[in-house]
Image (cartoon, coloured by chain):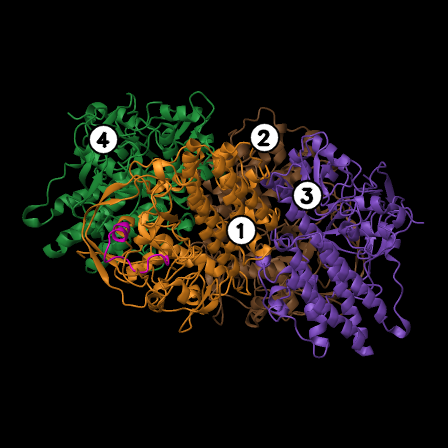
Chain colours: A orange, B purple, C brown, D green
Amino acid sequence: MKTKGSLLSFQYEYAAPARAGVEGLHDRDALWQRFRSVRAHTQRLAAPLSAEDQCVQSMPDASPAKWHLAHTSWFFETVLLRPQLPHYRVFDERYAFLFNSYYESLGPRHVRAERGMLTRPSVEEVLRYREHVDAAMERFIDEADDAAWNEAAEVLTLGLHHEQQHQELLATDIKHLLSMNPLQPVYAPASGDGAAHALRDSTGQTSRDGRSPAGAASASVVSALHPAAVCGEPMRWLERPGGICQVGAASSHGVDDFAFDNETPRHRVLLRAHRIASRPVSCGEYLAFMRDGGYGRANLWLSDGWAAVQSQGWQAPLYWSDVQAERPGIFTLHGTREIDPAEPVCHLSLYEAAAYAEWAGARLPTEFEWEAAAAGGDPALHGTGEVWEWTRSSYDPYPGFRPLPGALAEYNGKFMVGQIVLRGGSCATPPEHARPSYRNFFPPGARWQFSGLRLAQDLDR
Amino acid sequence: MKTKGSLLSFQYEYAAPARAGVEGLHDRDALWQRFRSVRAHTQRLAAPLSAEDQCVQSMPDASPAKWHLAHTSWFFETVLLRPQLPHYRVFDERYAFLFNSYYESLGPRHVRAERGMLTRPSVEEVLRYREHVDAAMERFIDEADDAAWNEAAEVLTLGLHHEQQHQELLATDIKHLLSMNPLQPVYAPASGDGAAHALRDSTGQTSRDGRSPAGAASASVVSALHPAAVCGEPMRWLERPGGICQVGAASSHGVDDFAFDNETPRHRVLLRAHRIASRPVSCGEYLAFMRDGGYGRANLWLSDGWAAVQSQGWQAPLYWSDVQAERPGIFTLHGTREIDPAEPVCHLSLYEAAAYAEWAGARLPTEFEWEAAAAGGDPALHGTGEVWEWTRSSYDPYPGFRPLPGALAEYNGKFMVGQIVLRGGSCATPPEHARPSYRNFFPPGARWQFSGLRLAQDLDR
Amino acid sequence: MKTKGSLLSFQYEYAAPARAGVEGLHDRDALWQRFRSVRAHTQRLAAPLSAEDQCVQSMPDASPAKWHLAHTSWFFETVLLRPQLPHYRVFDERYAFLFNSYYESLGPRHVRAERGMLTRPSVEEVLRYREHVDAAMERFIDEADDAAWNEAAEVLTLGLHHEQQHQELLATDIKHLLSMNPLQPVYAPASGDGAAHALRDSTGQTSRDGRSPAGAASASVVSALHPAAVCGEPMRWLERPGGICQVGAASSHGVDDFAFDNETPRHRVLLRAHRIASRPVSCGEYLAFMRDGGYGRANLWLSDGWAAVQSQGWQAPLYWSDVQAERPGIFTLHGTREIDPAEPVCHLSLYEAAAYAEWAGARLPTEFEWEAAAAGGDPALHGTGEVWEWTRSSYDPYPGFRPLPGALAEYNGKFMVGQIVLRGGSCATPPEHARPSYRNFFPPGARWQFSGLRLAQDLDR
Amino acid sequence: MKTKGSLLSFQYEYAAPARAGVEGLHDRDALWQRFRSVRAHTQRLAAPLSAEDQCVQSMPDASPAKWHLAHTSWFFETVLLRPQLPHYRVFDERYAFLFNSYYESLGPRHVRAERGMLTRPSVEEVLRYREHVDAAMERFIDEADDAAWNEAAEVLTLGLHHEQQHQELLATDIKHLLSMNPLQPVYAPASGDGAAHALRDSTGQTSRDGRSPAGAASASVVSALHPAAVCGEPMRWLERPGGICQVGAASSHGVDDFAFDNETPRHRVLLRAHRIASRPVSCGEYLAFMRDGGYGRANLWLSDGWAAVQSQGWQAPLYWSDVQAERPGIFTLHGTREIDPAEPVCHLSLYEAAAYAEWAGARLPTEFEWEAAAAGGDPALHGTGEVWEWTRSSYDPYPGFRPLPGALAEYNGKFMVGQIVLRGGSCATPPEHARPSYRNFFPPGARWQFSGLRLAQDLDR
């Protein structure tokens, strides 16, 4: 039995899905089950939240929970139901304006920074919208002829991965919102069988920390939407040879072997020999950096990072408090408590990650070093999947990159400037969503994601 | 029977309250009834709103409805219950931080621009807070000995007027929020016996428009939180002699003859002979200004006003739409419809009011011209009480002005710079709240209040 | 002999000009001499400055010295030479765009905040522009027929007062620019016979401080563009009765009895009995306020002022340094040195002036209290003319105010909102420019003018 | 004879320098001559500018010409003279504060955005500073013992390349400043033997365009600080095979084979087969994009680019005017004229370059595709060296990148985030400064550099 605590590569977790159905037809039942499961998971995430919690937008980068609930439904309505389901009745024509995120080709849309003004439609109305879309999707999956179905299955799969991305965003956005409240509200208790549990184990299968679900139910929930303390053992360097590696995904938007277009085409890269750390950097290690004056030493920082430190007054990762205390506090979705030195450090900007690496006499891995190690078998990267790991790779298109056709061309490609690639997945990433070739990306100053780092080093330094 | 549509001065509406009780003791029952009535009215105003509506802050100048509900309770708790009610149990110690508006002397407080982040406490919790405060206030009114009571009655009265100010703000803030929503939600229907009615007639007495409540119920509600169409007749000039007038209020913070400190001391001013308009400027008249290119002619505008026109892209009053249509649209709390030319024009900045007056060959009255006319008997100012009327007086302290002692010194005095006086009251001003000496004040660019204008002219021009 | 140090009223200094010439015709020679004198004074002010000094704009509120030199010439060209001098050759048609300050009715103009981008025309070219205008003005004064002349004389006089306003602005703007330079450049030495001297005594007559020029030359220059140490004696209260007073100027834009339109019409006001201080507040007194924590006590401040203290980090008047030292430093146009406790405190915002007054148990005078005292004979206001004195009067129009006709309507009237009146004149105000009815005005947060304060008090407090 | 108009690769221009002197000692005379030449060239660039032109800062990204003159001298003083020349007298201790650009390790420095406030020191003083440094450098080169010299020669060479970078910045910054002036001043005429000539041919050797200096003198000057019209012939695709290539520079900071640290280490990359355009995109071609609605079609743009188009109102490249005219105007350092369709389009942001490429059915080359083609011999890239060419490569560190030791570590490495690589050099790049491995970098929205583009395409599209 694979255990999370071992050094076994996490990529096996992504190897599970069976291949496509007989004679090339995607299995309607299986996809319908998956659709229901993903959709239900989104709502479980919102369940602990009041209508007020779901409505407010805490900063322009974040969106209200209610908006996530509606937008992910708009996506299915727009790319599948409207064009392909005969006699589909649009739930509300005005939602095309309200819940289009950024698709210029789909017409004008509501200003992003004003999503929090939408006290109407209410949460109830949005849930009715979801039911309406779900019912229509069920009918569509039932009624589509084989040709239409086979094509639609890929778009549907994209829609599910899209919704999973928003599940993570919903968690990070709500965390940011609640953190702004002086009352420091608790999203959900860290134990029990409520919504928090659902976040990490909605499938009823082996929980992320590798313990059997029966015996570990309450324990596994402890770390539900917070990184597990996987950095208890000393970091070791894994030596990696140089040479040509295959990276990326063969094709995008399949059903059983889904990948986003930004992971394609699969191609060869030339790596230099290097070392990569056996596990992410821990809170305890990061605290040593802070205690050594890390936030006050310009020479450790990228120029933009140093400017951010000064203009933002950064002294610690986002959500830390009592920074001078021997053990600082940390705001989590399950309450505020002391940091655990064995947790991966989290909610860092790229700037902080790079400054830490400089202080530690190391560097960040490139996205390809990371991917090669993650995909490369035994021994591999421990602790992956707790925090997104900043790489030292800007988010540029792969050679030969071609976006999806139509409106979906806007899904990824147009953001390929000014952002940095993160790899791996986090405690808030839904199960079966990430994979070694997955390219997450955020601007270098972003801190509200579950973002940490893993060190690397040149071999010949 | 006094009718609203006549030229009879509105000041009689404010003359009703009986004098203080026997032997100088304020009547506990009467004040308790008034307390209950005002407190209930606030909640009736919020009743048509969902929890989401009550939580969101649409701009830094506005506050969430829920915040208004809580802050007005905090006020009683802070100035009466904590210092004066033995064994008073504070509802939640953290509310002193959350719901202090701007009292520096009462300690640190939550950032104004982040009031909308407070998804917790919930509306329900805030309503429990209100009940808790109301119950304690009842006990206090019952149990206070005569000396304490007589002193407290004045502070209580201030608290009620404070709450009435927030009733109007609640209405203007909600109007702004709903207007930001592309769905253009209706706060409440303009007819029927629902909450909208309550806004203008919570006392069960003669409604503001002078019609008998029984027969006019549905009609009176039509104009509930929107200015009534009182400008149907042609404007006439009322000639006013020059000379020495008494203005202001004799003393602040009484019970039966309450006035804010900024209205004191009563003093003499020297007026010049002038004319003042018989009624406010109407939407129809303002539309003529617009059609004559008023928003494009720099020479009509104050310098800061012209800059605002250009930087904000103003082309019409706030909440107008379809400006090029023969009859533009207007967003109201009761839905969007065409403007009524006989309505007072509303939601103007001082800049627009002054530009209109310039275009019309007139000027705005000073606050003292206005007050002298309003207080001066027959014939007087028609249409007063529908829209706050911008004056050409900056909000400076009166000669001999002395703020209240203690924390209440911050109530008015510290805002006496950079603001302009408005007079009269609006459709959203609670009954018995305004009076001829009342000095409302806002920065010259503010448009989200129910603000219009009345013209004046020098006699010897 | 009147001495500056005495309590004799300064208004006599403004009484000197002789009446208009025989038979109602203004004296051409006298005006030409005055024109030459004013124009030469402007250039003397710029003489100590390099071309670089004259080109740079240190903030949007300030203008480059070169721009002042050109704009004041553009004024004469635009209001006199173009419309009235036959065959006048415009120096450069493009200057109408570059050097129009804010006259909307005179066409589009260069963006105010970009005046510092004008490295061309060069200083030399601007000086040629001035010569060109001066020569044309000489011809105009010679050649105009009597009717045209008599009318033009008033506009010419306005142009001279306009240029004097810019002389003071040139000094304050250059002071601000030089203060931004870490090298802390000296504009001119405080002694000697250089340009600095010229600033205060360009006419060759009795110097501003009343001493004979011969004996006082070096001493008078010491304080040239810095307030003289006139606060050496203890402040005394001057009691002033209440009642009706005449304020303002009878008519605007005369020649021998010139006043700006904003000083008119002369009218009666009703004053309340009060006290006014015998002299301005000194640096020593202000330092006591600072030492008593004045910048840290919210209850002393207007709300906007307290916000400014916090957002700007104010801890002392503008241009003070080493604030913790026993004797802080002060940057002046004549170098950086220690403050002199007997100097009037200078470079305050209204907010600081009002906070100081609150701390001192006093208030600021209204503009009419100030004017009545200044115009009222003996004993009167000592130290007037060293620093502009903030009043507690917003800059509103006088009753019956009517702006000048044509483009000159924009001179003053359109700024009558959001500003505060200052009275008296400063060390940088040219001789014969100010008068008791003079209304200077700036926004309440402005600190780069030579602005201080004088206390007042209600009699019956 | 190599001619500019041919397809011969420009890299030969960079191949000229002879190897280091005998026995490994760098030739003192040769370096001194080169020092003098580079230093003189900087001053020739500034010669057509008035003191005012040299003082003003037109935006935070730009620096005053005078500041460039001083900063480049401060560099030699700081890295060579102070640490290594015995008895060196620092010219002015305060300059370390004023003219340090961004070296945190060298102490505090003047705020970048306020460089334009430095009207002092004057241009004359800065020129004296340059003389002082030059004289000391001459003494240093003479007197250093061999060991010190050999080490210093590398730093000196770096200092010269540093100064050459500032020569280009001086030109681009002055262009921006002059363009802000409604008078549209001419920096220098495009013909004659003045300073403009010097810009492109300060060495007296073969001019950049390959013509013999004698015959081409006047012609070469025509295009002096403006891209030459090298796009007259139709663009052809050059097919480039995939495979492993060497890129980068072997070592940084040599003398005869100088490279910046950001070009190192030389390493192998794996390229995919592709096409690259024979010449840059021309103004004529770009105009076709504009006429086809390129600035109005969101689907062509990166997301940040589309936001910039809308917020900045971009409709054409920077410095274009009369955009609707058949032949738009263009502001150049030699005056404003119509665009030449055969000129390379210039002053584009990366966003515009990428949108054009999308419109043209192509893409931008990666920096390695560009370098391989430029270094790769015949046939190669025509028109290189007229405009910097945006690549589709973010400015990330090379594998194994190690910054210089000491303060010079800040030279390049700390800027490696948020920027995009440009390749090739421009008409404003000094001779012998660029090379195929040269990595210029700017943020994607920057337009004031001489930046254009060259197209590329995948082979298998």
Q: Which mark is residue C139?
A: 2
Q: Amino acid at mark 4?
A: Arg
Quadrant in the rendering for residue A255: top left
Q: Disc 3 sits on a residue from what chain?
A: B
Are labels 2 and 3 assigned to the same chain? no
Q: Amino acid at mark 1?
A: Pro
Q: Relative to A112, is C140 above or below? A: above
Residue occupying image coordinates x 59% and y 50%: A123
Quadrant in the rendering for residue D186: top left
**Count of numbered circles on the image:** 4
Q: Which mark is residue D208?
A: 4
Per the rendered image, the range of residues in magenta is A371-387
Quadrant in the rendering for residue A130: top right
C247 vs C150, nearest the viewer: C247
Q: Quadrant of the N terminus of chain C?
A: bottom right
Q: Disc 1 sits on a residue from what chain?
A: A
x then y, percent, for residue A32: 46, 44
C131 vs D295, nearest the viewer: D295
Residue occupying image coordinates x 32% and y 23%: D342
| Crowd band around label 1 with a 10 angstrom C-alpha radius: few (<14), some (14–19), many (20+) | many
Residue occupying image coordinates x 40% and y 23%: D288
Residue occupying image coordinates x 53% and y 55%: A46
Are labels 4 and 2 assigned to the same chain? no
| Tag 1 residue | A64
Callout 4 secondary element: loop
Question: Is there any visible trace of residue B194 in the rendered image?
Answer: yes
Q: Relative to B147, is A366 above or below? A: above
Q: Is residue A378 magenta?
A: yes
